[in-house]
Image: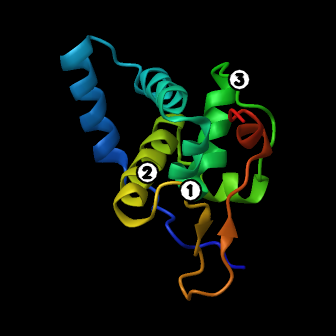
Amino acid sequence: MQVDGFVIEPGALDSLVIETVENLKKNTGRSDLLGHGLGVVWRRLQRNGMARYRDYGPFWFALKDELRRAGYPVGDETDPVIAARYRGSSGAHTLMAADTFRLYSLSTYAVGTNRFDLDGDGGEAFMLFDRDMEEAMPV
C-alpha cells in the first residue's frame, strides 16, 4: 500500500500554527500550543470515550507519540510507518494536522470509523487499531 492519502505538505500548516498560537496567547495568555492542545485532546478522549482516538485517523499514531512524550498514559503500541508518514515538522504541526483531520473525519465519516483509504483508489484500506486504546475502553 502506498501511503499518500491525507498527507499534508510541509509548510502547509505554518500559517495555521502561527494563527492558533496568536489566538491562544490572546485568549489564555499561554503560548505553548502543543502542551495546551495535547491537554485538549486528552480531555476529549476522557469525556467522549477512548474509542474517539479513531477520529484522528492515520494521524493517530503520530499524535499518540506526542501524547506519550508529554506523559499521558496512552500506552506504547504504535505503527512506526504510519506515525512517520503523518508526523508534522514539529509537535505543534502534528497536533494541528491531526485536529484538522479530526474535523474532516467528523464531517465525512460515521463516528467510530477506523477504515481509511490512504492510496486514494478505494483499494486496500488502512485499518486503524490501537490495542492500548481499545483496552482502555470500558466494557
Mark 2 sits on what residue?
102
In this view, the residue in front, 68 or 16, is 68
Residue under the point 71% across and 23% down = 73
How far apart are labels 2 and 3 at the CA level? 21 Å
Specify the amino acid type for callout 3: Pro
| 115, above or below 88, in the image | below
Taking the spot 45% from the left edge, 62% from the top edge, the residue there is: 110
Disc 1 packing (10 Å; few <14; some 14–19; many ≥20): many
At label 2, the amino acid type is Arg
Q: Residue at x 54, y 43 (%)?
A: 52
> Which mark, by number, is residue 73?
3
**Image location of residue 128, percent across then percent down:** 68, 58
Spot the residue most to the top: 29
Residue 71's place in the image compared with 90, above or below, is above
Q: Quadrant of the N terminus?
A: bottom right
Nearer the observer, 112 or 69: 112
> What amino acid type should be assigned to the residue bearing mark 1?
Gly
The residue singled out by tag 1 in the image is 57
